[in-house]
Amino acid sequence: MTDHTQLAETFRRFADQQAQGLSPLYATLSRVIARTPELLDLAAHTQPGQPAPNMLLAAVHHILRRGIQHPLAPYFTGREDLAEARGADLLTDFGRRHAGQIRRIISARSVQTNEVNRCTALLPAFAALQQQLDDGRPIRIVDVGASAGLTLLWDRYTYDYDGHLVTLPGSDPDTVLRCDVNGQAPPLSLDVTRFVRPVGIEPSPVDVTDPEATEWLVSLTWPEQTGRMHTLNSALALAARTPPTILSGTAQDHLADIVDETPDDQHLVFVFSWSIYQIFGSPGGRERLVDTLADLSQRRPLHEISIGHFGHDTPRMIMASHDGGVSRSDTVAHCDVYGTWLDWLATPPARPNA
């Protein structure tokens, strides 16, 4: 069999740094895969640039969710612990039985986790931006790396910040996003009528009216995260009734056109939620993004809200302005990758003279 030393290390890191504490099942199965050449051979069919652990485990989850009978299935309910030795036997057998289907899934699909609960970090950013842009002009949001576009529907959800409920005119009472607040209270007051014509950009948009496509999104959630799965299903149901607008293609395909076609009387805001490095590469993706937006800002002022690790252990949110080729940015919050907690740090930068 092929030497997959580096791939095995990827699975070990995933077990220790990502799954540990959040998904005991995936931590166990990742360690199993890391030391099983047969399973590593299977994982090697993941598309280039895609995270093999997420893809292989999601493929297994996806097949099991379609009703396949196998002794591995009960462990994917999140209610029973799986010993590593037993996991090795079961996963190897499952991989042999469904190798063709697994290969087809991981060689064609990608990780497009549309974490709707990240809107708990975005809503305060939108509120802060609106306070900064106090001229009453409309604000247009562009979500770059939109997947199914669920964060574009941020004004359709109900928010619970440590028991403080935030409801907007279009909030669905059954789709509640929860967030623990650390430190100072974030800004939460905003006028949603100022936010107009939101649009997403995505190389492979997820059709929220296609059950097969949305089922893959659900399969990407981890088995123990039943609350997250429920919220995703609820948001997908909302989206299916009023699908968001998503442009198919890369950021490079659409950014300049959006800058040109957005009316001058609208503020233009680009949002990157854990998508910068997928679009602009790593390392140096953040720097390439800044260069791109600074160049486009020669045409008109632009605003940016970006969330990611950016070389730090703790994820953070950056708010930036780009005007006349000059970029200014501030870290305004730390937050959880799933939007379960938020630590609002600072008042966003003053509005530049423009």
Image: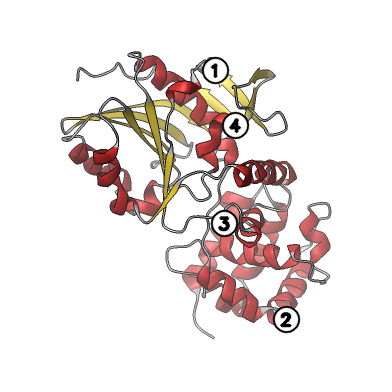
Relative to 301, is 337 above or below? below
Is there a contact, CB below 8 Å, between mark 2 and mark 3? no
Numbered mark located on residue 183 in the image: 1
Classify mark 3: residues with Cα within 10 Å, few (<14), some (14-19) or many (20+).
many
Q: Is residue 191 left or right of residue 340?
A: left
Q: Earlier in the sequence, mark 3 or mark 1?
A: 3
Mark before the other along the chain sequence, 1 or 2: 2
Give the labeled residue for mark 2. 97
Looking at the image, tell me whether mark 2 or mark 3 is earlier in sequence order. 3
Marks 1 and 2, Cα distance to the nearest angstrom?
Answer: 51 Å
Task: Identify the residue under disc 3.
Answer: 14
Marks 2 and 3, how far apart in space? 25 Å
Point out the frontmost of discs 1 and 4: 4
- Residue at the image point whose x is 75% and y is 67% from the top: 87
Q: Residues within 10 Å of mark 1 (few under 14, many from 20)?
A: few
Pointer 4: residues within 10 angstroms few (<14), some, or many (20+)?
Answer: many
Q: Is residue 44 above or below residue 286?
A: below
Looking at the image, which residue is at 58% across and 59% down? 54
Residue 160 picture location, percent across and down: 66, 24
- In the displayed structure, 317 sits above or below 13; it is above
Taking depth in this image into account, of 97 and 192 the one nearest to the observer is: 192
* Corner quadrant of residue 33: bottom right
Q: Nearer the viewer, residue 232 or 87?
A: 232
- The dot on residue 156 is 4
Q: Secondary structure at mark 2?
A: helix
Of mark 4 and mark 2, the one earlier in the sequence is 2
Mark 4 or mark 3: which comes first in sequence?
3
Sequence order check, earlier mark of 1 and 4: 4
Q: Secondary structure at mark 3?
A: helix
